[in-house]
Image (cartoon, grey):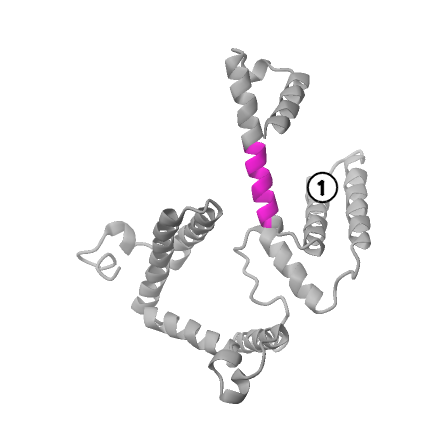
Amino acid sequence: MSRLRHPAEGCPWDREQTFASVAPYTIEEAYEVSDAIERNDLPALKEELGDLLLQIVFHSRMAEESGDFDFNDVAQTISAKMIRRHPHVFGEEEERSREFHSDEWETQKKRERAEKAYRRGDNVPSILDGIALAFPALMRAEKLGKRAAKAGFDWPEIEPVFEKMDEEILELRSELEKNEISEEAVEEELGDILLSVVSLARHLRVDPELALRRANDKFESRFRFIEKQLFEAAKKPEETELAEYEALWQEAKQSK
């Protein structure tokens, strides 16, 4: 990477990159790692982990050029964090004899969030600190809800979650029945519905991001089945009636 970033002998594309321009590739590579794991493709996982490591090296090299930190600092920082969070493994003999407790892990994370808040000049750290804006909205919603739940901001039972979903759906319907529909208000109400669905997933102990990905895969598989049936019948999709689509969809459900 040092050679690629060399001001005279390096690659023109690599030289002109910044943290911001590389960030989307970093996110993309992380998703490709996840995809390889989902497919249980270990050769692909090896390759994708290398691609993800390259992203870490890339960012570290740019930071080294600016004099902020280097790759060794990155490795040492995460090593120190893992040691700090695992006193039952790395601590003194008395600490190692104790069983691991998740509340101790959370206490340590809370302390680290407070230290970060103070460093940026915020004297009132939030339990929501550190939840990256770059997360997919569905994933971020789940993480925000989990953090808030740890502070006691949550329903103890699942029934109020269903009631909240019904309430949000009614609010969207009400907005759509107005003489002048506000696109901004519709977006807001729809967002509230999605947030309540994520809350339901959390109560059911279901990963909403994974659930939606699998639903996407299922939809894609069934729609491709429909396309194949139409092709074999020499029929164009745009000439297909909705009722026929529905019949083929039901057939796809039975075949998968």
Tell me what residue is drawn at x 56 percent, y 17 percent.
237
- Location of the C terminus by quadrant is top right
**On the picture, is 32 further left or further right than 188?**
left
User: Going by the picture, which residue comes out furthest to the left?
Assistant: 9
Image position, residue 84 (x, y; %): 49, 79
Camera-nearest residue between 87 and 246: 87
Q: Is residue 128 left or right of residue 85?
A: right
**Residue drawn 80% across and 44% down?**
171
* Residue 232 vertical position relative to residue 179 in the rendered view, above or below: above
User: Which quadrant does the N terminus fall into?
Assistant: bottom left
Q: Please, what is the three-letter code of the amino acid marked with disc 1? A: Val
Can residue 212 be found in the magenta stretch? yes
Q: Position of residue 246 (x, y in %)?
A: 67, 22
Left or right, residue 91 beside residue 7 = right
Q: Is residue 57 above or below residue 235?
A: below
Residue 141 drawn at (x, y percent): 63, 55
- Report the predominant secondary structure element of the magenta stretch: helix
In the rendered image, which quarter is residue 189 located in? top right
Q: Residue furthest top?
A: 234
**From where the camera sits, is residue 70 visible?**
no
Q: Mark 1: which secondary structure? A: helix
Q: Residue at x 46, y 46 (%)?
A: 35
- Answer above or below: position of 17 versus 85: above
- Label 1 neighbour load within 10 Å: few <14, some 14-19, many 20+: some
- Horizontal side of 94 relative to 193 (left or right) equals left
116 is higher (above) or lower (below) than 212: below
Can see residue 93? yes
Give, as a single range, the part of the protein colored magenta: 209-220
Which residue is at 39% across, 59% downward?
19
Is residue 213 rendered magenta in the image?
Answer: yes
User: Which of 51/40 is in front?
Assistant: 40
Label 1 belongs to which residue?
A: 186
